Amino acid sequence: MITFFGNLHEGHAPASEFYRGELVPCFEKPARAHYVQAQLALQGHDVRTPAADSRAVLARIHTPRYLQFLETAWQQWVALDTANAAVQPFPSVWPVRGLRSDVEPVNFIAKLGLYSMDNGTPLVEGTWRVVKQAADAAAHAAQLLGQGERGVFCATRPPGHHAGADFMGGYCFLNNAAVAAQALRDGGCERVAILDVDFHHGNGTQEIFYDRADVLFVSLHGDPLTEYPFYLGHADERGHGAGEGFNLNLPMPAGTPADRWFAALEVACERIVRHRADALVVSLGLDTFEGDPISKFKLSTADYSRLGERLKRLGLPAVFILEGGYAAAELGVNAVNVIDAFE
Ligand code: Q9C
Ligand code: ZN
């Protein structure tokens, strides 16, 4: 399968994130991509560097002010104090209920809070270049499907599905799955389906397409009552306006074993078939793995082949986008099992 691998990963390698109030090494690290690349090479896949420019499609997914902030955030941070070059900025204040999010403050940390859903999305000097290249891969993959490819895998990081139109969160900055879906629509697909199998609900992707009938969003994930992102992902979120009925959430409790997960996947696949989609985008999170350090489902390495086989039976051309998956050493085999079985 044609796969895209970025060559800038060391540029987005923040040192630490908050975990239970303490700073710990980041779970979302460059080694993740390297394990995937190694396994892709081992299995003989065609690994390329993304060459499309996603800027036009990014402007259809994210707000101008958010893109402007993201692109210049590090320069703004260092302009405050050159010593900041060695310091990771974190937000500490957010515009929750009753506070205004329509006016961008001048204070940098206040801006960072405006454009963040959590304090778990560290941003460093190279972040923009790395996230832009991942979005470029998503746009390029959509172009290749338009030229007749049956499957393309974006082995990119950081992930994207928590990023909304106007905010970052959950290690995500640009919503690569949304970029792929929109690029497929712009390339002539009438109907697109996004299947999100990451352990965490894809709140950003849901939000972006919530009022649209042309892009179906279906997600299997840990119940937000107990799992991140907590404030979205419930079963009663079915879409709004023209998009009513085009959002399907299948939350499951922590500890969910493979058989129950695959039963939910059947429900998801039936809904995708009913959508009569021209193309599929898979938000391929591998943090459903039993060995994942921050997630709570129980899929095994062999289950990822089963997932790929089931998706193949949909008979749709597909763009796969790497999302989460933090058991880094197993990530390559698990991801490539999906890809190999799909082919
Ligand atoms: N500091 C994705 O899998 N933080 N994002 C968990 C650990 C949020 C994961 C607590 C996890 C977000 C794309
Ligand atoms: Zn996840």
Image: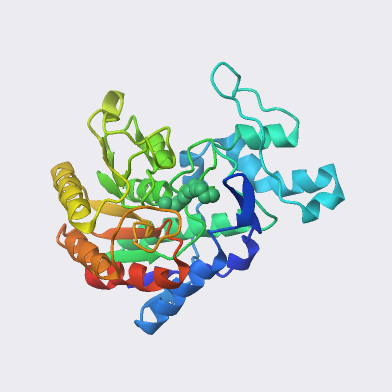
Q: How is the image coloured?
A: rainbow
Q: Residue 112: which quarter of the image?
A: top right
Farthest-out residue, top: 98
Drawn side of residue 83 relative to residue 315, left or right? right
Closest to the observer, 120 or 132: 120
Q: Residue 94, relative to residue 140: is it above or below?
A: above
In this picture, is 75 found above or below 130?
above
Quadrant of the rendering where the C terminus is positioned? bottom left
- Looking at the picture, how far across and down is residue 229, in whole percent? 44, 40
Q: Residue at x 43, y 56 (%)?
A: 324
Viewed as shown, does residue 163 lie left or right of 254?
right
Q: Position of residue 268 (x, y in %)?
A: 20, 47
Q: Which residue corresponds to the image point at 42% horizontal and 56% vertical from the top-left?
A: 323
Camera-side residue of 292 and 87 = 292
Q: Position of residue 253 (x, y in %)?
A: 29, 44
Q: Is residue 91 left or right of residue 177?
A: right
Residue 171 at least partly seen: no
- The percent coordinates of residue 15 (x first, y second) are 66, 59
Q: Nearer the viewer, residue 89 or 313?
A: 89
Question: Is residue 11 rendered to the left or right of residue 296?
Answer: right
> Closer to the camera, 180 or 332?
332
Q: Farthest residue toward the right?
A: 82
Q: How many marks?
A: 0
| For residue 9, above or below residue 202 | below
Q: Quadrant of the N terminus?
A: bottom left
Q: Is residue 276 visible?
A: yes
Can you say whether 247 is above or below 105 in the image?
A: below
